[in-house]
Amino acid sequence: MRFKKASQTFANFCLILLISLGLTEIIFRVYNYLNPSFIFHDNSYNRFRGKPLAPEYNFNLNSQGFKDVEFQVEKDPETFRILGLGDSFAYGVVPYDYNYYTRLEEKLKQRDYQLEIINMGIPNLSPKDYLALLVTEGLALNPDMVMVSFFIGNDFDDSQRSIWSYSYVFSFFKFLIDLQNSYEGKVIHGNLEYQDDQPTLTDEKYLQIEMGRSDLFWVENSELESQVQGAMEYLREIQELCDRQDIDLLVILIPDELQVNPNLQAKVIDAQQMNLDDFDFSLPNQYLQEELTEAEIAFLDLLPYFQGYSELEQLYKPNDSHWNIAGNELAAELIFQYLQRTPEQIEL
């Protein structure tokens, strides 16, 4: 009898707990819909963030730890503000003056646009972090446009959703835990002198990295479709936030060097004892293009342009996988040309 009573009490407790969690989940979701909050998204990107005011070649990061000049939170009503989101490509291995976001801003300003681009690139981020950064800090800057730089080489790696993103209740508890872990930022390039033609890694180490990424381009890769869907979930959430606040969204598809460098392709294929027919180096781009088109998200795929220009000029820093100065300049020019010919979508 005593055991039966205890069991009934426990069952009632569990029922009340489930009902409470369900109601709390609904309340959090309604609140986040009306007033988007970083609490319900992973804000762990801070562990990769630059140290505020840290030296970066011949430049200093701003007080927010971004590789950009200082900016005002309040936007001039006459200024068109673009937020540049991305990982180490957006942050760049080149000095600030040569970064493609910097160069794009200069090109647009030469056309008499009253415009500013805020580069919020942070190394090692992924689509879920782009969403978190936008919600946590980006929306408060009242942007007119969000530009997401999606790196094909590794932006699929961490795109699978976790329990934290499915449940707002769990996200809230994770937020309370994360409060205990503040960030101090990191010094990334420091006072180094940038050398555009010097390799960053050894041949062996760089080959290992590109071999690890090569499965993205396997013709028989059975996981690629789910990886694309995982990334698209976050891009769609970014789109929903932008649509809700009348913000333009443009996704830039950034190719991995393995997609544009035939010599590197040959080394990777030979090291894995495979054949060229086993690979399609445009495969993830094709999947993403289909999904982005269906979602009505504007995008610019840089792959075909970089494939063509790479025959004429080195566009990636040796053994680094990031663009050199020439690669950044080409990207800035391609994005600039895209913005010029799509006035019906993007009003500058």
Image (cartoon, rainbow, N blue to C red):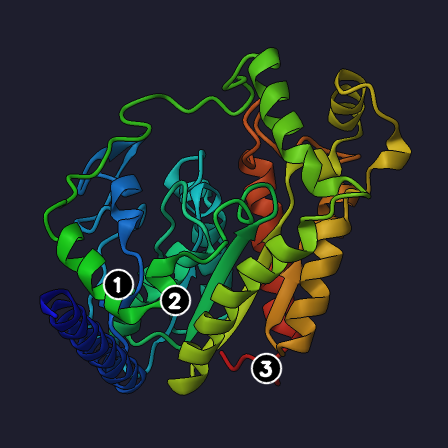
Residue pictured at 30% horizontal, 73% vertical: 139
Element type at mark 2: helix
When asked about the image quadrant of residue 256, the answer is top right
Report the amino acid beneath label 1.
Phe
Could you say where residue 17 lies in the image, as x and y percent from the top left? 19, 74
Along the line of sight, which residue is nearer the eye, 197 or 290?
290
Q: Is residue 202 left or right of 190 when viewed as pictured?
A: right
Element type at mark 3: loop
User: On the image, numbered disc 3 is attached to which residue?
Assistant: 345
Residue pictured at 68% horizontal, 42% vertical: 216
Along the line of sight, which residue is nearer the eye, 116 or 128?
128
Q: Is residue 298 left or right of 90 when viewed as pictured?
A: right
Report the amino acid beneath label 2.
Tyr
Could you say where residue 261 lies in the image, as x and y percent from the top left? 74, 32
For this orientation, the residue located farthest to the front is: 1
Position of residue 188 relative to residue 334, above or below, is above
Tell me if I can see residue 318 in this picture: no
User: On the image, numbered disc 2 is attached to which residue?
Assistant: 166
Element type at mark 1: helix
User: On the image, numbered disc 1 is attached to which residue?
Assistant: 170
